[in-house]
Amino acid sequence: MATIQKEILPPIDLSYVRSQFPSLAQTIDGHPAVFMDGPGGTQVPQRVIDAISDYLKHNNANTGGAYATSRHTDAAIAGTRLAMADFLNCDADEIVLGPNMTTLTFAMSRAIGRELQPGDEILLTHLDHSANVSPWEALEERGVTIRLAEIHEQDCTLDMEDLANKITSRTKLVAAGYASNAVGTINDVKQIVRLAHAAGAMAYIDAVHYAPHGAIDVRALDCDFLVCSTYKFFGPHMGVLYGKREHLSRFQPYKVRANTNAIPNRWEWGTLNHECIAGITACVDYIADLGQQANPWATNRRARVLAAFAAIQKHEQELMKILIHGLLAIPGLKLYGISDPQRFEHRCPTVAARIAGQTPLELATKLGDRGIFTWDGNYYALNLTERLDVEKDGGFLRIGLAHYNTAEEVERLLAALAEITI
Ligand SMILES: Cc1ncc(COP(=O)(O)O)c(C=O)c1O
């Protein structure tokens, strides 16, 4: 596979990137819209919109029928599995499609829970989104014990020593995030998987927040399961689960009798969202095209996805430097998470902050009035906002950058915050 070093990558062609996303051209009360709400869902390129509407115009049908549009639907779904297999580096039959990450995780926790006994343990973390917490906590009704790995409060990183100490011979599963959707921390997922496996436990990784920011390689991670949501990486509102073939074949889903036992279909119940599934291939192809621009020698879609994320990371790190440097200069601002530029490879460009004297909601509203879209609250990272004791005061203001954001937009945000906080 032809790879290229990050340092010599050409800069991302931002005018090409932005021309692909029609929503970026919007204005709000005369202000050009600035989308810094990516962690809640990113914008989509035109080709995703086209793929969805094209499917509905020409191929709208149910699966498995003996006629053209049904066969085209089967082919579109098979194509999406191949695209997601390239995206995650696995085989197509290890890809399960579903409505969203949360639903897929509840389905999997219910199936895994069938085999657990009272006294078995599941280890979760204080850094995680509720979608990788509540489905496992639901197994407490079977007598399963839930434990929580701690964080280092000063930089909102996982306390790996505590995590290692809390994995015991009773631990059956460790569920952890690849990156925090609140404070941006990227976890050492490979080490988490290693620690889980050393104790005979499985590792369930929530890659929802990481997926728009970095390449994922489930084979290299050796995780048992990994989940993501395509609407967070420039695709439609859908969820995708990777499971090792042996697990998808062995665990028993709650499914209808008419569903076959073949993987991955035994995990996909009812009629899926075919038009959105068609959109997923278009979103992976958009990312791959970006990779081809970064590295014209990348020989296949997987290599192009890797090149795309190398270019995306380089761009996002530049934006992050401007953003965090500017935020730290605002009087009364407290930033949660890693702020040292030397450690930026351990964080995503998702920044949580509070500013004395104004609630996160007040700040987000004033920014929104200026056409700058951020978020306030806990974004379901409830274990973290409670642990840091900010839940009672409205959580954080979250600024979430994506590769389509520009340095000018970051400067605009900083100027707006300076104006709002004087
Ligand atoms: C880190 C993380 N995990 C899980 C989820 C839930 O994903 P979904 O909306 O696909 O259920 C989110 C959604 O914001 C998230 O940010």
Image (tube, rainbow, N blue to C red):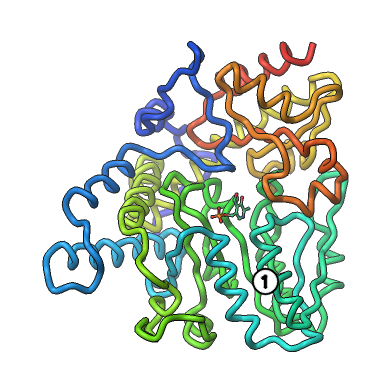
Q: Quadrant of the C terminus?
A: top right
Which residue is at 58% across, 23% downward?
372
Which residue is at 39% across, 25% downward?
15
Q: Amino acid at mark 1?
A: Val
Label 1 residue SS = helix
The spot of residue 10 in percent (x, y) is: 45, 35
Q: Image check: 275 left or right of 413?
A: left
107 above or below 52?
Answer: below
Q: Quadrant of residue 61?
A: bottom left
Q: Nearer the viewer, residue 102 or 166?
A: 102
The spot of residue 243 in percent (x, y) is: 51, 74
390 above or below 332?
Answer: below
Which residue is at 41% across, 76% downward?
264
Residue labelled with disc 1: 193
Q: Nearer the viewer, residue 38 or 196?
A: 38
All told, the count of numbered labels is: 1
